[in-house]
């Protein structure tokens, strides 16, 4: 069994009270027992009751045998609490198919079993309910389903509809499909009470639906509710499928019993695991677990787990959600976070199983966990997550002031383990971590930590828990193992409010490399991107940014190495780089050589209280090389003077302050004729007039006002054109200011007595 407590963090939580209406779950009818119908004619099932050791036992005989298949049909099928029901298993029979043709759900409150090794199918389209004391006693696989029929390879059906047919339809063929009707009914496992109100003190996992080693336990129906209790196989397969449409689920025999596919299902139902429900496939090799639904909720300390206990390879834990997967809440009493877990246990040499998740949206909050680790020699499984829309991790809890750690996705090499850690790969549109949430690849033992790779449109790592635990993306090592690499590919990366993006080694191992490829990256409010090593080579940081890198308000990008280790290198290639308000880019070491810093940018903006530095406290300083392909305003972002010369002071004594005419203004809105910065040359002149005057306009002005036109003598009419003056053209000095009849004022080049600027501006 997976040692959850050894990897769990003790988190306080107030449990909700969960109520399930007796009427809605059980109906108003009295509990009947097992009643055969007459659809199989002379081959109908028979039930013999007998008392053994004071316990009532029902033995189910008869039925229709077709070579390896045995068929049973019932009007009602229920097992009372404290009682048991067993199917006889003739020697030749490998699979027992039992259907319920009545109108009521089957209630399994006692023990259901098979006196042999045959697989058992229980088919009831009206629903199946397992009570708090329900158990299975089968040596083969168990498939409980609310399908309408089982389809076989020869196209025959064993139907539980209102007209189920007769013995002619029975077959010797193998089952290939579970066929569902228009509204599949639900399957419920009430491991913590039979429909009554549950409080935290009453939580007690008494029910256990278990199949033997290397067998399949499958519950496939409408909505699935698993409220407490345990679903268990030792290295076999557990299948949970929720169907919400008339469709078929593929079925195929394999070494672990049966496998299922949902290619023909257009619409899924919901799956809920509540009140410390446990789905466990741990064995010599961790077993396969598959959960398929629309919205999948894992809450209240519920776990889905598969541990490798010996030398066999672990199988995959798969979650497929067409809408949302949510993992939330902690079981305070048992110290278990809700989550998905695969592991290699101490002494085991087999590898751990992978965790594969596909969903539109994934939410992990209130201490929820997705975890893969190794305690032994074998390598931990990898975590592969694809979310069409978003992945959101939030460390908040119901009692946030008592929260000690946030929600997380992690692969870990546990202390003393020699196996390597698994990789983490995330693909989504938007990834968000807040309030102490973490995604981490770590080694606390001898093995190497796995790599963490993120592909997203946007990545936001923000805020901390009240305890001070920051939200983080990290690849780290604490002993002699080397840490993995951290790779981020995104359009926008934001690291804010003390959050961290880190590769580190605090032991004798080397820190991994941190590579970020993005359009833009922003660090704010003490956001940090770090590569740290205590005694060995520091990790390198590489940022390949298309547009911009911005550091503000005590933010930092740094590599550091303690002892005699060499500092890691920092390589930044970005459109613009801005570091303001005591924000730094540094590569440092204690006794070794300082790391090198290479920055290539179109523009560098660095405030006087910020720095770019590569040094060593006792060793040789590193080299800082900054190449600005555009302009550099390093250390010149000086605040403007507070005391400005007002416009009233400038014009107080001029005619502009005294004239009676309406006032005008002259506004320069562009930089034409002015340098881009104080160190540049003049680049371009703009015309003072908004349009040039051609010859036709000049003749029109002459006819309109002969006296005024005589004052306008242009030395060369050919020079009057629509062509703007450009660098290299001759400069012709203006001879005067001329006001035209329409009120326009121009600079004239004729040698005549010009109008006075003062008379033009300060006229009465």
Image (cartoon, rainbow, N blue to C red):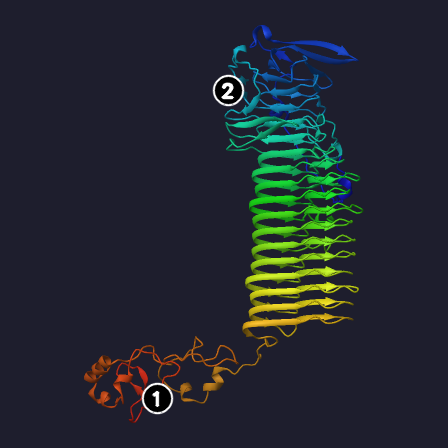
**405 to 233, vertically: above or below:** below
- Which x, y percent locates residue 757? 36, 89
Q: Residue at x 62, y 34 (%)?
A: 291
- Which x, y percent locates residue 204? 75, 31
Nearer to the camera, 32 or 502: 502
In the rendered image, the quadrant that contains the N terminus is top right
Which residue, given by chain and number where applicable, does mark 2 sit on?
Answer: 155
Q: Tell whether 168 sits left or right of 128.
A: left
**The image quarter in which residue 146 lies:** top right
Name the element at disc 2: loop
- Which x, y percent locates residue 158? 55, 17
Nearer to the camera, 418 or 131: 418
Q: Separation of disc 2 and disc 1 at Cα?
A: 98 Å
- Residue furthest to the left: 703
Label 2 Cα crowd, 10 Å radius (few <14 / some 14-19 / many 20+): few
Nearer to the camera, 495 or 107: 495
Name the element at disc 1: loop
Residue 732 is labelled as 1
Tell which tag, 2 or 1, sits nearer the viewer: 2
């Amino acid at each position: 069994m997976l040692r959850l407590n050894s990897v769990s963090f003790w988190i306080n939580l107030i449990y909700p009270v969960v109520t399930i209406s007796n009427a809605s779950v059980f109906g108003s009818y009295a509990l009947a027992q097992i009643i055969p119908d007459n659809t199989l004619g002379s081959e109908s099932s028979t039930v013999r009751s007998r008392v053994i050791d004071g316990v009532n036992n029902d033995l189910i005989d008869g039925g229709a045998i077709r070579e390896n298949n045995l068929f049973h049909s019932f009007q009602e099928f229920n097992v009372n609490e404290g009682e048991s029901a067993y199917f006889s298993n003739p020697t030749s029979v490998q699979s027992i198919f039992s259907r319920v043709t009545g109108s009521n759900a089957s209630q399994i409150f006692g023990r259901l079993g098979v006196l042999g090794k045959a697989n058992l199918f229980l088919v009831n389209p009206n629903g199946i309910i397992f009570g708090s004391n329900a158990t299975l006693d089968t040596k083969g696989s168990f498939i409980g389903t609310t399908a309408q029929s089982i389809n076989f390879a020869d196209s025959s059906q064993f139907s539980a509809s209102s007209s189920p047919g007769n013995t002619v339809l029975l077959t010797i063929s193998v089952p290939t499909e579970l066929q569902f009707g228009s509204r599949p009914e639900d399957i419920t496992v009430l491991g913590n009470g039979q429909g009554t109100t549950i409080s935290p003190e009453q939580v007690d996992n008494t029910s256990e639906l278990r199949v033997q080693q290397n067998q399949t336990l499958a519950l496939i129906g409408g909505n699935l509710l698993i409220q407490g209790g345990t679903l268990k196989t030792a290295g076999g397969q557990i299948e949970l499928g929720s169907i919400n449409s008339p469709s078929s689920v593929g079925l195929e025999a394999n070494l672990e019993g049966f496998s299922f596919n949902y290619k023909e299902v257009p619409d899924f139902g919901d799956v809920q695991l509540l009140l410390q429900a446990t789905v466990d496939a741990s064995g010599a090799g961790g077993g396969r677990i598959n959960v398929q639904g629309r919205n999948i909720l894992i809450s209240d300390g519920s776990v889905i787990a598969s541990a490798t206990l010996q030398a066999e390879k672990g199988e995959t834990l798969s979650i497929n959600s067409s809408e949302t997967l949510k993992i939330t809440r902690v079981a305070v009493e048992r110290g278990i976070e809700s989550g998905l877990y695969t592991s290699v246990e101490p002494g085991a040499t087999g590898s751990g199983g992978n965790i594969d998740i596909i969903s539109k949206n994934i939410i992990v909050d209130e201490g929820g966990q997705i975890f893969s680790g190794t305690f032994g020699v074998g390598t931990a499984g990898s975590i592969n997550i694809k979310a069409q829309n978003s992945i959101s991790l939030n460390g908040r809890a119901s009692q946030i002031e008592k929260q000690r750690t946030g929600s997380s996705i992690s692969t870990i090499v546990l202390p003393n383990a020699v196996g390597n850690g698994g990789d983490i790969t995330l693909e989504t549109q938007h990834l968000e971590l807040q309030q102490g949430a973490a995604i981490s690849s770590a080694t606390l033992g001898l093995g190497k930590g796995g790599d963490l790779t993120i592909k997203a449109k946007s990545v936001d790592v923000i805020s901390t828990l009240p305890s001070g635990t920051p939200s983080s993306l990290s690849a780290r090592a604490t002993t002699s193992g080397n840490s993995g690499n951290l790779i981020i590919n995104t359009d926008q990366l934001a690291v804010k409010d003390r959050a961290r993006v880190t590769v580190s080694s605090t032991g004798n191992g080397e820190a991994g490399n941190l590579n970020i490829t993005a359009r833009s990256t922003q660090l704010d409010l003490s956001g940090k991107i770090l590569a740290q090593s205590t005694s060995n080579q520091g990790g390198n940081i590489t940022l390949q940014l298309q547009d911009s890198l911005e550091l503000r308000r005590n933010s930092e990008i740094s590599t550091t190495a303690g002892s005699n280790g060499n500092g890691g290198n920092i390589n930044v290639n970005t459109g613009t780089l801005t570091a303001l308000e005591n924000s730094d880019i540094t590569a440092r070491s204690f006794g070794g050589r300082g790391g090198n810093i290479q920055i290539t940018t179109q523009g560098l903006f660095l405030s006087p209280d910020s720095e770019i530095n590569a040094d060593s406290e006792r060793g040789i300083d590193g080299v800082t090389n900054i190449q600005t392909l555009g302009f550099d305003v390093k250390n010149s972002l000086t605040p403007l003077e507070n005391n400005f010369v007002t416009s009233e002071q400038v014009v107080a004594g001029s005619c502009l302050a005294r004239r009676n005419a309406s006032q005008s203004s002259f506004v320069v809105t562009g930089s034409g004729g002015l340098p881009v910065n104080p160190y540049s040359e003049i680049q371009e002149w703009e015309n003072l007039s908004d349009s040039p005057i051609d010859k036709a306009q000049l003749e029109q002005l002459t006819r309109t006002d002969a006296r005024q036109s005589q004052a306008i003598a242009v030395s060369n009419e050919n020079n009057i054109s629509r062509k703007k003056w450009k660098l290299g053209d001759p400069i012709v000095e203006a001879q005067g200011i001329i006001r035209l009849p329409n009120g326009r004022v121009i600079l004239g080049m004729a040698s005549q007595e010009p109008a006075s600027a003062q008379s033009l501006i300060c006229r009465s």
